[in-house]
Amino acid sequence: MSIEAKLNAVLDSIDQVKSKASGAADHVQLIAVSKTFDADDIRPALEAGQRVFGENRVQESQGKWPELKTDFTDVELHLIGPLQSNKAEDAVALFDVIHTVDREKIAKALSTEMNKQGRVLKLFVQVNTGEEDQKAGIAPKAAVEFVKRCQDVHGLEIEGLMCIPPFDENPGPHFALLRKLAREAEVEKLSMGMSGDFETAIEFGATHVRVGSAIFGVRE
Ligand SMILES: *Cc1c(COP(=O)(O)O)cnc(C)c1O
């Protein structure tokens, strides 16, 4: 199947689940995750009309997106991978949305950079719903307070929460936990669901699904 056909199949599934599930959001944004794929692989998705893309590395994105953005000026680029504070300047310059705010230092660095560059990015707080040692994200019990600190101390506008459930677990309870925390923190958006579980995520109210391999194929 072509990238365009796979993209359309994912968009169709999103619509189908959305129309059936009572807990689904009115609008579910597909983020096409193009990490590890180069500009030539991404172009067919752009030509098919997709404009919202996700990448997990700042440096890799700098190598391909400036060129693609000159041809497709209305692209919206989402950073979905961990951010180091020394990359905040580059991230704020290139990305429109960051899903991985998970600690004080990053919140502060983003606030400083957005002020300096006069750019306002949309932000998500990443929550480590499975409390996995190796995974980024703030602990669930600290999430609501952290959102408040981002807003009150750092002046950041937090759109919502993001999670990546443990690979070997049923994702449903993690999506439910993220939804519950978002309600408590009074933020609206939920970034959850990947190629293997985006349908489930939509049933739990996802507003943003991050789908890579189902569109671009298996990564090396
Ligand atoms: C790679 C990645 C995805 C997409 O994963 P697929 O299984 O290829 O759909 C989604 N979210 C994050 C944070 C990722 O790093």
Image (cartoon, helix red, strand yellow):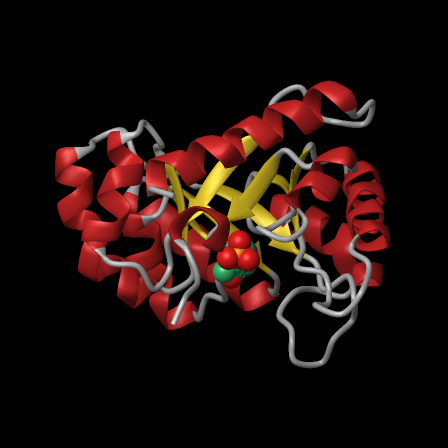
Kindly tell me whether residue 107 is visible in this rendering: no
The residue nearer to you, when weighing 197 against 4, is 4
84 vs 69, left or right, is: right
Residue 140 to residue 19: above or below? below
200 vs 11, left or right, is: right
Residue 23 to residue 52: above or below? above
Which percent across, then down, holds residue 83? Answer: 46, 66
Which percent across, then down, holds residue 116? Answer: 31, 49
Kindly identify the residue that appears in the image at 41 percent across and 66 percent down.
219
Kindly identify the residue that appears in the image at 70 percent across and 68 percent down.
167
Which percent across, then down, holds residue 37? Answer: 30, 59
The residue nearer to you, when weighing 27 against 183, is 27
Residue 74 to residue 209: above or below? above
203 vs 164, left or right, is: right
Q: Quadrant of the N terminus?
A: top left
Which percent across, then down, holds residue 97? Answer: 44, 43
Residue 136 to residue 148: above or below? below
